[in-house]
Image (tube, helix red, strand yellow):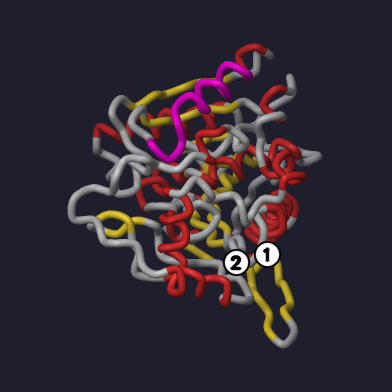
Amino acid sequence: MARVDYVFKTVAYRAQVVNLTATVHLPANISSVKGIALYFHGGGYVVGSRAMLSAAHIEALNEAGFVAVASDYRLCPTISVLDGPVADSVAAYDWARDELPALLEKGHGVRVDGKNIVTLGHSCGGGLALLMASRPHPPKAVLDLFGFKYLRDPFYHTAIKTPPPAGAPAPPSAEFIEQVFQQIPPPTAAPPPFGPNGPDLSTPRGAYLVTSVRGGVQFDKIIAEDEYDLVDAAKLLEKPNFPPTVFVQGTADVVVDEKFTRWAHEALQKNKVPTELHLVEGAAHGFDARLNRDDAAFAPIQRGIDFLAQHIGQ
């Protein structure tokens, strides 16, 4: 698989320029390309990077006929969800649909119609993938992998009362955590929220995310009260023209309750929008992060990608 990086958006911060980049993963057989699959990474809007699209996901997307694209967005909390993750993801979507096809044909001999675009994402990236349904030319289909939605629900705004597991590191000082607010310009990449031994509190950014989620205040400083409807797909999901959507959700997810995915699936069913729901019994948030394609647990991910492929060209 060949890969190539493109800058799709630049943002000036006085003397500094932030380049927002998309990594394009091309299949070995370029004649098999049928569409573009644009991926948004997870990380609670605060951590993560486009590199979180794993080799297994890329391979499955390529085999299904997609050019797989993973894009940057600026990370909170020194920018809001609306001005950072949402605005940058919209820019990536419009670029991938309108400009990327010409770049691929000129540079790599790949012919693909930008109208044949689908979106997918993990966690908050799943929420961003759903939000692309608001664009004038929405995606042909969406794959939501335990994505953020119904963000006003008390679930997200209630402190977690269960104590951290035995052996978990103690929360760092408030002074250490507050260093995240010195990170201007906001970065476009940060280590994932979980390391090999659980939540990663070794950086101010990681500690900020983990402690704010546990405190039920994860959205307080990054979503204004009048911006929820602009960053949450909840109301979009009630519209009869929502794109065909497939949901994958673990039943043991404590970051995104499975009820939200059920609600979204039922909302689409009510309007007769093509939709599938794949619940993975006992699976936690991010259960697919380290899977190989031949792992049994990858099966629901494969079904989601097959769903995307079925709706290209329709």
**Picture quadrant of residue 141:** top right
Mark with earlier residue (1, 2) = 1
Residue 129 image position (x, y, % from top left) = 60, 42
Mark 2 — residue? 21
Magenta residues: mostly which secondary structure?
A: helix
What's the residue at 63%, 18% (across, down)?
A: 267
Name which residue type carries label 1.
Phe
Is residue 60 shown to the viewer in this render?
yes
- Label 1 secondary element: strand
The part of the chain drawn in magenta is 254-267
Which quadrant would the C terminus be assigned to in this image? top right
Question: Is mark 1 in CB contact (under 8 Å) with mark 2?
Answer: yes
Pick the residue in front: 147 or 202: 202
Asked if residue 149 lies left or right of residue 93, the reply is left
Above or below residue 306? Residue 135 is: below
Give x and y (percent) for residue 310.
55, 27
Residue 188 lies in quadrant: bottom right
In the image, residue 170 above or below residue 184: above
- Left or right of residue 199, residue 61 in this image: right
Where the N terminus falls, by quadrant?
bottom left
Q: Residue 102 in the image: state x and y as whole percent.
A: 71, 58
Q: Residue at x 29, y 62 (%)?
A: 170
Residue tagged by mark 1?
Answer: 8
User: Magenta segment: does it hold 159?
Assistant: no
Q: Is 305 in front, or is 122?
A: 122
Q: What is the x, y in percent for residue 176? A: 43, 74
Count of picture labels: 2
Front position in the image: 30 or 259: 259
* Residue 100 makes an appearance in the image: no
CA separation in Å, label 1 and label 2? 6 Å
